[in-house]
Amino acid sequence: MIQEKVKVTNGIGLQSRAAATFVQIANKFRAHVWLEINNKKVDGKSILGLMAMGVYDGSIVKITASGDDEQEAFKHLVDFLRMPFDASMYARMLEAMPNHNDPEEMERWRKEHPQALQDQDKHTNEETALGE
């Protein structure tokens, strides 16, 4: 499980389009994702939950990811909260991102992107060495 407090600096918080995009990113991963603000904790894959939280630009939220692909999910979602929101950029990114919940799609993606797997293995091995 990974968790961290993050200041939302994407320019618009998690209102409508940004909340929908956050949920789309979260749903690309198997990891469970939660967001917490002001003692309210919601499923990061629930658009209604996110919109009800009232997360604005400048808010500080605690994001938690837990599961097989938690590190990758966490990285993408934290980056999303910190980078200026650009709907067209995220639409392109989502199209290119494999659906981790679909084993066949992941296998196709792995064959097409062998360098990405090597980079991921290198990153995982570095973290393991740091933890020992």
Image (cartoon, rainbow, N blue to C red):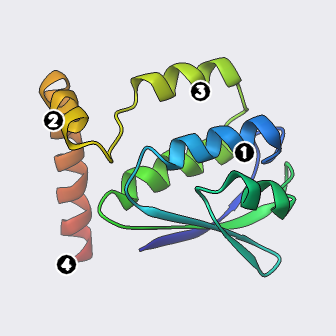
Going by the numbered disc 2, the residue's amino acid type is Glu
Give the labeled residue for mark 4: 132
Tag shown at residue 33 = none
Q: Secondary structure at mark 4?
A: loop
Cα separation between marks 4 and 1: 38 Å
Q: Is residue 2 left or right of residue 41?
A: left
Give the labeled residue for mark 1: 19
- Select label 3 or label 2 by which is in front: 2
Q: Residue at x 34, y 33 (%)?
A: 98
Q: Residue at x 85, y 53 (%)?
A: 58
Q: Residue at x 80, y 54 (%)?
A: 51
Cβ atoms under marks 1 and 2 closer than 8 Å: no
Q: Secondary structure at mark 1?
A: helix
Cβ atoms under marks 4 and 2 closer than 8 Å: no
Q: Residues within 10 Å of mark 1 (few under 14, many from 20)?
A: many
Mark positioned earlier in the residue sequence (3 or 2): 3
Give the labeled residue for mark 2: 107
Q: Residues within 10 Å of mark 4 (few under 14, many from 20)?
A: few
Q: Residue at the bottom extreme? A: 39
Q: Position of residue 50 (x, y in %)?
A: 74, 57
Compare residues 9 and 32 and report the one nearer the observer.
32
Going by the numbered disc 3, the residue's amino acid type is Tyr
Cα separation between marks 3 and 2: 23 Å
Give the labeled residue for mark 3: 90
Mark positioned earlier in the residue sequence (4 or 3): 3
Q: Residue at x 82, y 38 (%)?
A: 11
Q: Position of residue 107 (x, y in %)?
A: 15, 35
Cα separation between marks 1 and 2: 29 Å
